[in-house]
Image: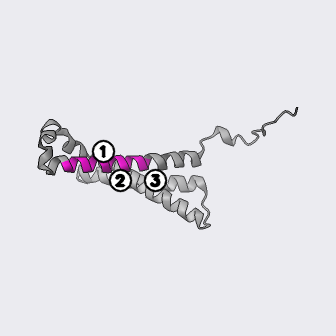
Amino acid sequence: MTNVALPRNTTRQAEAMLYGGVARRLHQVSGVVIIVFVLVHVIVQAVWHVPMFASAKAAAPWLQALQEQNWVHAILFFCIAFHTFYGLKLFAGELGYSFHYKTAFWAIVGVSALFGLREVLRYAGI
């Protein structure tokens, strides 16, 4: 019987933040946020404009107010930007282009945060 030896962790890479894993998870979460927002938006518009749902409109007046919150739009715009830019990065990688993973991650997060910040500043009147 042979003992299986795991490779030594001499570089300590596994102890630091794994940017690829964080980026993939954030890409998945941003996709889910976009889908949930679109579903809620369609439901709100149906409740708001279809006469058959008038009783639901009276029972849940907060639906329209929730949809118009600036923080909801800021999160949505960040998610849309991150999901788009990270998807383009993945596509470029499939085409053979190479990016340093930390630089690409922080650049995508930074640009995406600007989209969210722009939405907050727009509601603040700046």
Mark on residue 110?
A: 3
Residue 70, compared with residue 87, is above or below; it is: above
Q: What residue span does the magenta drawing correspond to?
A: 30-46
In the picture, the quarter occupied by the N terminus is top right
| First along the sequence among labels 2 and 1 | 1
Label 3 crowd (10 A; few <14 / some 14-19 / many >=20): few
- Please, which residue is most extreme toward the front here? 52
Residue 49, compared with residue 10, is above or below; it is: below
Asked if residue 31 is among those painted magenta in the image, a careful observer would answer: yes
Q: Which residue is mark 2?
A: 77
Q: Nearer the viewer, mark 3 or mark 2?
A: 2
| First along the sequence among labels 1 and 3 | 1
Position in image of residue 126 (x %, y %): 26, 54
Q: Which residue is mark 1?
A: 71
Asked if residue 66 is among those painted magenta in the image, a careful observer would answer: no
Q: Residue at x 87, y 34 (%)?
A: 2
Rendering quarter of residue 93: bottom right
Q: Residue at x 51, y 45 (%)?
A: 25
At mark 2, the secondary structure is helix
Q: How many marks?
A: 3
Q: Does residue 106 appear left or right of residue 38 in this picture?
A: right
Contact check, label 3 and label 2, Cβ < 8 Å: no
The three-letter amino acid code for the residue at tag 3 is Gly
Rounded to the nearest angstrom, the CA distance separating label 1 from label 3 is 17 Å
Rendering quarter of residue 69: top left
Nearer to the camera, 86 or 4: 4
Q: Residue at x 70, y 40 (%)?
A: 12
At mark 1, the secondary structure is helix
Label 2 crowd (10 A; few <14 / some 14-19 / many >=20): many
Nearer to the camera, 110 or 50: 50
Q: Nearer the viewer, mark 1 or mark 3?
A: 1
At mark 3, the secondary structure is helix
